[in-house]
Amino acid sequence: MISAIMLGLIGSLHCLGMCGPIVLALPDARRRTRLHTFTAKLIYNVGRVATYVTLGLVAGALGYKLEIGTAQGWLSILLGVAIIIGVIRVKWFPARPGTGTSKAWKAVMAFLLRQKSYPALFGIGLCNGLLPCGLVYVALAGAMATGTATSGAVFMALFGLGTTPAMLTVALAKNAIPLKFHATIRKTIPIAALLFGLLLVLRGLSLGIPYISPNLSPTAAGSHSHH
């Protein structure tokens, strides 16, 4: 689960580059005291993390279903390879900005952005969590590899919490982050995703390395249970 927090912390740089405009466009609460402003941004992030947790619940449950009749190691390897291939594909064949976002999503977001209430900010966070995002897909792969719905939800909760400090900072500091920093962000994320994919592959190989590639074989698990 440490990998979930680390992925979130590193990925928060990516979040600043991709979701920064949405965060900066967030409506202020009707009362513009510092406390209300902070509360408004926090509620937005709670909504965003709530979506991640829900997606993690589904991904973990799916991972559990896929484990029935097959080895958990193979699932982890396949997910790791998929992440590595995905990073290479995005690096060489990037999608055009704005693709994959539905008109319905845009309409809902436009409506919520016009409101000045805490429920609207929570709703914006929920919608933002559904944005097509390679980093979220990487996190969901990790949640699926946990093999249970509960663990998947916890994994995504920790991932979301890891991204929150940076998202809160940019929301409160507005334009404090220089544009030149965005280029560094975009170079860092593919490396982090590749490392995470490699970690999943190593985990699936069951090399007996603690934390990095533990032994996942049923015989090993059974021998531990007898002690």
Image (cartoon, grey):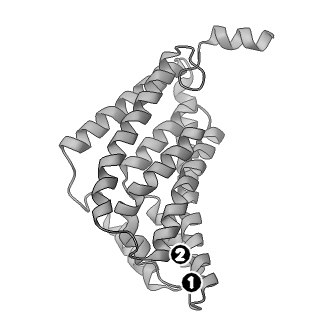
Q: Residue at x 56, y 90 (%)?
A: 32
Mark 1 residue element: loop
Left or right of 120, for residue 107? left
Marks 1 and 2: CB-CB under 8 Å?
Answer: yes
Q: Which residue is nearer to you in this view: 100 or 94?
A: 94
- Dividing the picture into quadrants, the one containing residue 152 is top right
Left or right of 106, for residue 212? right
Q: Quadrant of the N terminus?
A: top right
Left or right of 150, for residue 192? left
From the viewer's perspective, is residue 223 above or below residue 187?
above
> What kind of residue is marked 2?
Leu
Classed neighbour count for the residue bearing mark 2: other residues with Cα under 10 Å, few (<14), some (14–19), many (≥20): many
Q: Which residue is nearer to you in this view: 51 or 195?
A: 195
The numbered disc on residue 121 is 2
Q: Residue 28's spot in the image, x, y percent? A: 51, 85
Q: Residue 68's spot in the image, x, y percent? A: 57, 22
- In this rendering, does residue 101 appear at all? no
Q: Residue at x 29, y 33 (%)?
A: 85
> What kind of residue is marked 1?
Ser
Disc 1 and disc 2: Cα gap in Å?
6 Å
From the viewer's perspective, is residue 188 above or below residue 74?
below
Would you name the residue on which mark 1 appears? 117
Q: Residue at x 51, y 23 (%)?
A: 203
Q: Residue 201's spot in the image, x, y percent? A: 43, 24
